[in-house]
Image (spheres, grey):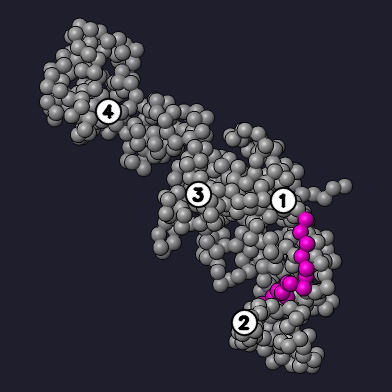
Amino acid sequence: MAKEVRVRFAPSPTGALHIGGVRTALYNYLFAKHNNGKFLLRIEDTDQTRYVEGAEQYIIDSLKWLGLTPDEGVGFGGDLGPYRQSERKEIYKEYVNELLANGKAYYAFDTAEELDAARAKAEENKETFIYNWSTRGNLKNSLSLTETQTNELISNGTPYVIRFKIDETRTVLLDDMIRGKISIDASTLDDKVLFKSDGMPTYHLANIVDDHLMGISHVIRGEEWLPSMALHELLYDGFGWEAPRFAHLPLILKPEGKGKLSKRDGDKHGFPVFPMEWKTEEGIAKGYKQEGYFPDAVLNMLALLGWNAGTEQEIFTMEELIQLFSLEKVSKSGARFSPEKATWFNHQYLQQKSVEELLPSFEEVLKENGIAANATLDAKVVELLKERANFVKDIFEQGQFFYIAPSSYDEKAAKKAWKDDSKEILSKFIEVLNSSDFTAEVLHDVMADFVTTQEIGFGKIGMPLRLSLVGALQGPDVPVIMSTLGKEETIVRINKAIEVLG
């Protein structure tokens, strides 16, 4: 029977979750669901010096907003917890002791100053210092000291770390699901620290032990972890465990294509790189949620940054992504982030949504602008203006004249639209409006008849009328604007324009 597919997203709570991390979570989620497996959230907080208050909750909130709900993990329950590494200290101690007992790890007592001196000496000889088989015999550790000396140092409370003893005779054969087969000469690797003097494990030990105990079948993570893959394979071997399959995802690159996408790029170009806004003492970093993006549009955009279904299709439902996703179709090379494409995706999703679906978000925007909801009017405005909008807030920006009468008139537009006879023409038109029905169809005919009886060009009425109602030469058809505003408001606005511009 095939092993159950179990994957994990394992961020560190050191700040906001970058969209590169969101894509890693998404690919893990898609892989799990495609294979009827489980998706876990583990919080890797072994580095207490970099821990940031609020970051863990931010990660959980972001996954919830995006709909990437873990089956198990911090904040989601499960039988194989705790899922927070800082609560698993005793477990790691047990496993590092096992490696020590089997001669796979050793105590190292070197101070930071002694290691700096060893590095400086290597530099003098134009060499690179590596703590491994070539240097460990000349350094202060349980391999170069006697058992008595080692025990004495430990009982005296001398600070130490525990290092993994790499077998330098090995050639490590790796098989990455995205990058293929890789061969590493173990003699080039260093004896990594597994356990620190503060009683906390390093990432490497905690990661391996947790993945094993949580039954992780596939490790899907960013390519920055590729250099650690050989060490992790050797650690699995050291414990006598079967390693999971590994897959290292390509980077998300800056819009200009060189280098990894960073918060700085977002600040510079004015686009978000975080799912939700992140507040620090330096200020507020933009978030996709607060900028008005739909979560499904963000996920669709991210899915295609590094993965391709092999077709021309660009808009995918979550069900389609789950059905089509495979690691074989993930690219080895980095994917360039495009802010314009992100906006394009949001536009496509906005067009697909019905007026009823958009109404709650639109009324939220109205509320932010101090305007009370009016379901009938609001629905009409959304219907009229959604086609040209990329975001729900655009609908309000383009249609706020429906809610707020113009208090001034665009200067350029007024020069173009308001002529010497505009006052007289509009005054006559008001008389016609007073006795007219106020549907868009009727008003369209009323305007056409008016132009004919007055023997004027359509622009003579259309442009000053639009300016009166909107304050600028923009918006939908004038009869539609009038019918939406209603007779009373339409006439009030025309009279106001006559008064101000007359």
Toward which corner of the image does residue 470 lie, by quadrant?
top left
User: Residue 195 appears at what percent x and percent y?
Assistant: 69, 75
410 versus 167 height, above or below: above
Label 3 secondary element: loop
Left of 260 or right of it: where is 35?
A: right
376 versus 307 height, above or below: above
Real-space CA distance between mark 2 and mark 4, rounded to the nearest whole angstrom = 71 Å
Please tell me the numbered disc located at residue 255. 3
287 vs 370, nearest the viewer: 287
Residue at the right extreme?
A: 1
Q: Mark 3: which amino acid?
A: Pro
Circle 2 packing at 10 Å, graded few (<14), some (14-19), many (20+), is few
Label 4 secondary element: loop
Real-space CA distance between mark 3 and mark 4, rounded to the nearest whole angstrom = 35 Å
Circle 1 packing at 10 Å, graded few (<14), some (14-19), many (20+), is some
170 vs 222, nearest the viewer: 170
444 versus 111 height, above or below: above
Real-space CA distance between mark 2 and mark 3, rounded to the nearest whole angstrom = 38 Å
* Residue in the image at 68% along x and 46% along y: 330
Q: Are marks 2 and 4 in contact (CB under 8 Å)?
A: no
Which comes sooner in the sequence, label 2 or label 1? 2
Which comes sooner in the sequence, label 3 or label 1? 1
Which comes sooner in the sequence, label 3 or label 4? 3
> Which residue is identified by label 2?
123
